[in-house]
Amino acid sequence: MTKRTPTLAVALVSTLAVGLTACSGGSSGGPSGGPDRRNPAAANAGAVLGGTPQKGGTLSVLSNQDFSHLDPARNWVMPDMDFGTRLLYRTLVTYKAEPGAKGSELVPDLAEDLGTPSNGAKTWTFRLKPGLKYEDGTPITAQDIKHNVERSFSPDLPGGPDYAARYLAGAKGYQGPAEGRHLDSIRTPDARTIVFELHTAFAEFPFAATLPTFAPVPPKQDKGPQYDNRPFSSGPYKIETYARDKQLVLVRNTHWDPKTDTVRKAYPDRIVVTMGLKGTQVDDRLIASSGADASAVPWAALRPESTPKVLTKPEVKSRLLAESSTCNEMLQMHTGRAPFDDVRVRRAVQYALDRESIVTAAGGPALTDASTAAMPGALFAGGKQPDTLRIPLAGDPEKAKALLKEAGKADGFATALTVSSGDKAIGEAIQQALGRAGIKVTIETVDPSAFYDTIGDTRNRTDLVYTGWCPDFPSGSTFLPFVFDGRSIKEKGNSGNHSLFRDDATQKRIDEIAAMTDGDAANKAWQELDAQILAKAPVAPGAVKRRPLVLGTNIAGAFGHTSWGGQIDYATVGLKDPSKSTN
């Protein structure tokens, strides 16, 4: 592929950071656009609630689920990445802990800078800060970061970010370090230097270096799949106890040195995550904000049925965060299985889907916008999705029936849909909409913590799944290749491409765009490819949601971080009065 010069690589990283801030700071309020000040749910967008926290006390996190994964080799769900990389482990590079536009800016974390490119951005060198330590006081080394990157290739640790597999030279067929095999494309000349050799230019590599893959794991602590239960801390907190599906307790890592960390403030003494609560139970407890719940924050978003309880009460609404998410949700169809191997059937689904009913099921227009593209608006010019399909938001069941008749399915057919249990109402909206065209849908709900593992099992999953994708940084290169490149499909731990879409023309175009040296031309090409893919109908656009989160009255320093899909930034959250919390 065509080389990018190091100067262009640095310039493109800067442009990408500015690009995301521009898209998330507007006032159009359109799909994936910036905050709409007329929207009552968006009143606190870009704000820090509760003032500056005081050090100490116990922060409670009320959750309806366990984490999908905390192992940094497997952690690739936005809220989990936020929690893991802000509290338990550090990465080479990270995002600023600030609301709104500034939250998309990169800063060094374990590394002294954002990395030095050479060889036309095919080689990236990072130098670690001195004095970095794990929870037991032993030094963090470049070799430990190399170990975690290598273990991310292990078949026993599926589901994590696969930028390393996509870009590292000589990585094809590599299956991790378990048998003493190592990647020559990751060099560690000394304990503080790590060098990555890529098979192609990748100017956005510093953004990839924010991902948990680039956190350190000491080989002596690595317990394979069991490491998920007890990651070894390089961050400000360490795990005291972790009972899966019940409770996680974090306490201070006394060997974390704030002098080496400009991002994490580590205000609370303890953080207690209570799991297995019902979604509406969490909502009601935080709305009431009584006793210990005054010092609590929610893990999952406010349930749609709880929205009126918040927006109609000024005191509660003042404690609502609802940042616009950069994630885009869609109905993905198994293109390798009949009848969805027929593009006419897939287009019928696009026409049958009623996105207005999805918006209603997700909490209404105050919290959700109908989606009209595959990529979110943040990746389009002007911050707004185009509508290249031009299908009415309420659907067109008659057109859907005509397409099914062309495909020999005039009498319809039966199929099954998998949704996260929190999206059951959306599943029912999809079921009803497709039913209008004669497609009979059975809904299977899965606990959120097991959802991605379930739909990532390509042999045993249903034909339809409702899920989303969030760009890891503001570039089409972190969206379309992950959702529509058939070469990335895995039998288990499959991520992104849940339509199992394998299309030679699409794959060829992905490679051509990735080779472009002009950033503006590449952005335009990604946007054009979005429309071309939608015309082949592997997915039907669904919705773009805000992430509504109601805080307890004793919470301070809280904001929805744009780079974590609107989740609370755990780097800065704490308590107004620690003495009012329960230890």
Image (spheres, helix red, strand yellow):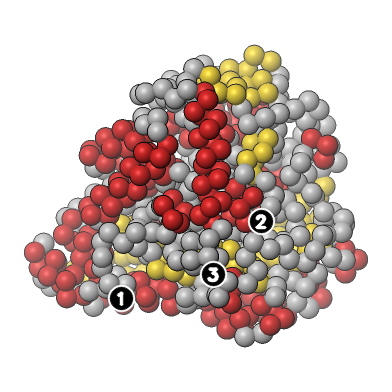
Identity of the residue drawn at 48% across and 66% down:
28
Query: What is the spatial separation of the Cα atoms under label 3 and label 2, in whole angstroms?
Result: 16 Å
Q: Position of residue 69 (x, y in %)?
A: 58, 48
Residue at the extreme bottom: 312
Q: For the residues labelled 3 and 2, say whether their Cβ atoms are less than 8 Å apart.
A: no
Q: Nearer the viewer, mark 3 or mark 2?
A: 3
Identity of the residue drawn at 68% across and 82% down:
314
In this figure, which residue is indicated by the disc labeled 2? 99
In this figure, which residue is indicated by the disc labeled 3? 36
- Identify the mark nearer the N-term, 2 or 1: 2
Q: Position of residue 338 (x, y in %)?
A: 19, 55
Q: Nearer the viewer, mark 2 or mark 1?
A: 2
Secondary structure of the residue carrying tag 1 is loop
Would you say residue 171 is visible in this rendering? no
Secondary structure of the residue carrying tag 3 is loop
Q: Position of residue 492 (x, y in %)?
A: 41, 44
- Identify the mark nearer the N-term, 3 or 1: 3
Would you say residue 169 is visible in this rendering? yes
